[in-house]
Amino acid sequence: MRAQLTIAGALALALAGGASAQQAGKPAGKPAATPDWAATVVITPQGGFRQGNPDAPVKLVEYGSRSCPACGRFATEGVPALRRDFIANGKVSYEYRDYLIHGPPDLAMALLNQCVAPARFFPVLDAIYANQQRFEDKLMALVKNQPQQVEAWQKLPAPQMATRLAEALGLIAFMKTQGLPEAKARQCLADAKLIERIAKTNADAVKIHQVQGTPTFIVNGRKVSAFNWERLLPELWANGA
């Protein structure tokens, strides 16, 4: 009701202002453009990627893993509604932070996803989740057919380990379809500063929020007991979304 009254009041003022302008022989000014909050993406100091209004009354953080089935279901079942009904209108900002619950494969995917420009982060994240089963099948075949090779890769320094897995899972080729050249992909897989940033995000997740699994949701600084869209939605409403 309050929103309706506010809108009605604004319309009344606009009409009155328009009439005054016409009486004075001046054209009425154009209404301010509505921000496209879903297209507003920045990298946060915590190493996450935030989509939406930075001053949104409800600030949602997801600690997620691209190889986590529950995260994949949230990406499919919850994120479209979250963007349409809450992010687009500026009520909720949504920040994705990497939590490498499955170790090396998650690191490879995180490095490649964070390699793209901020504006491309969420479209690429969506595409990775849409192909989650494809990458999982390749990983399971790799573990089954070449267990010694996988074990050897895990003993390599992080950049080499991530590169070997990215090659084996077809991630470098996949990222080409997302507009990331192979040379740039390989550069990011070996980026020590980016690896360090992701490692810090993981360490802070445990230290600050006691994150133990994925997805973990933080709403306005508080970890909530929700692991899917059905349980998260009431938390958003309760916080004013």
Image (cartoon, rainbow, N blue to C red):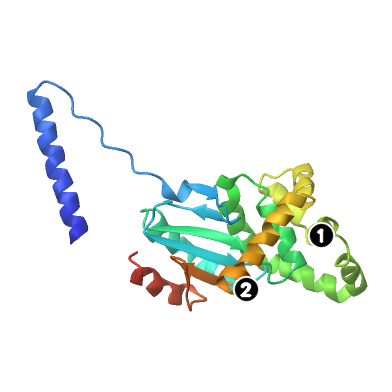
Mark 2 residue crowding within 10 angstroms, few (<14) / some (14–19) / many (20+): some
User: Mark 1 against mark 2, which lies toward the viewer?
Assistant: 1
Q: Position of residue 67 (x, y in %)?
A: 67, 68
Tell me what residue is drawn at x 18 percent, y 29 percent. Answer: 28
**Residue 19 visible (yes or no):** yes
Judged left or right of residue 17, residue 224 is right
Q: Quadrant location of the N terminus?
A: bottom left
- Which one is in front, 65 or 212? 212
Residue 86 percent across, percent down from the top left: 39, 60
Amino acid at dot 1? Ala
Marks 1 and 2, the one that precedes in the sequence: 2
Is residue 161 shown left or right of residue 80?
A: right
- In the rendered image, which quarter is residue 82 located in? bottom left
Residue at the left extreme of this rendering: 23
Is mark 1 in CB contact (under 8 Å) with mark 2? no
| 24 sits left or right of 51 in the view | left
Image location (x, y in percent) of residue 78: 48, 67
The CA span between labels 1 and 2 is 24 Å
List the residue tagged with mark 1.
Answer: 158
Identity of the amino acid at label 2? Pro
Against 101, residue 24 (above or below) is above
Kind of element beneath mark 1: helix
Q: Does residue 72 appear in this view?
A: no
The residue that disc 2 covers is 69
Instruction: Please tell me how crowded label 1 is: few (under 14), some (14-19), or many (20+) other residues with Cα within 10 Å.
Output: some
Mark 2 secondary-structure assignment: helix
Q: Position of residue 115 (x, y in %)?
A: 68, 48
Residue shown at the point (46%, 63%) measured from the top left: 60
| Quadrant position of the C terminus in the picture | bottom left
Residue positioned most to the bottom: 225
Residue lying at the far front in this picture: please name it.
207
